[in-house]
Amino acid sequence: MARKRRGVERTKEKASWLGPDLIHLLQERGYHVGTSVVSAFLLSEARLCSRRASRAVRAKDLGREAGASASAILDSAAACEARLSEYLAHVEYSNGPAAPDLAAVRSNRNAQLQWKQLFNELAPHIELRDNYRQLGCLMRLRDVVAHRNSRLRLIGDFPPTLAECVRAGVIPVRHPSFGYWALDVLSAVTAKWAASVATEWIAFAEETFPIGC
């Protein structure tokens, strides 16, 4: 059910549908609603897509592998972004309008830096290391997959925003290579990595910034 004013709905099992008349009535009375389940849905779907990509490899179906891998990458990154926004909505529900520093987190357009800002404000004692670097590489990977910008490249080269992550071994890619970066990252091994990064990051976030009642 919706909670009045700054309410945040937390539905773990299933969502209920509201008719248009009831929605209109609740709007007139000033009810607000949020949810903390979307990140979980996206993460679950990322894992499923990763497994679909692995099955496509066994079936030697490159098209399905690439499609499932792209979905896993996009859902993994989206889950990490959703978890942060859900936490901020929870803070607003619990404490009222966000303090200026937390409002600045929401206005930042870089998801990785949003997380860094949040840790700096609320958990400055925690040092962000390898998991934060992997999160950054996941976001870069999501960007090049979601915002396709095809152009001629030297065989075996990766886009500049990905090259460092691949060179350092942070993002695993297809081996042996096709020589074309898009097919090398739209692979089951990369999809599995993306889902794993999101799983570990969200578990870390839930331990540090739990969303309680």
Image (cartoon, rainbow, N blue to C red):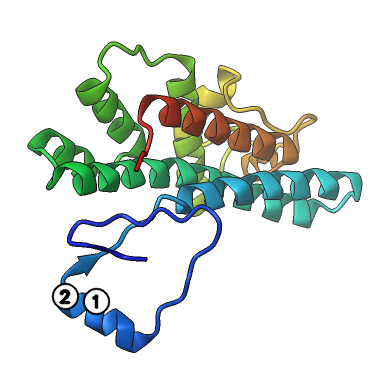
Q: Regarding mark 1 in the picture, which secondary structure is present there?
A: helix
Q: Mark 1 near mark 2, Cβ–Cβ under 8 Å?
A: yes
Residue furthest right in the image: 59
Q: Residue at x 76, y 45 (%)?
A: 51
| Labels in figure, total | 2
Q: Residue 119's x, y, as percent?
A: 28, 24
Which amino acid, by three-letter code, is at mark 1? Leu
User: Would you say residue 148 is visible in this rendering?
Assistant: no
Q: Residue 204's x, y, as percent?
A: 46, 25
Q: Residue 54's x, y, as percent?
A: 80, 43
Tell me, for residue 191, which label it has, or none. none
Residue furthest bottom in the image: 21
Q: Residue at x 71, y 36 (%)?
A: 179
- Determine whether, in the image, residue 23 is placed left or right of residue 83: left
- Determine whether, in the image, residue 133 is placed left or right of residue 48: left
Q: Quadrant of the C terminus?
A: top left
Q: Which residue is mark 1?
A: 26
Q: Quadrant of the N terminus?
A: bottom left
Q: Residue at x 54, y 62 (%)?
A: 14
Q: Residue 89's x, y, as percent?
A: 27, 48
**Occupied quadrant, residue 193:** top right
* Residue placed most toward the observer, 200 or 173: 200
**Occupied quadrant, residue 136:** top left
Q: Residue at x 35, y 12 (%)?
A: 127
* Residue placed most toward the observer, 86 or 180: 86
Q: Which residue is mark 2?
A: 29
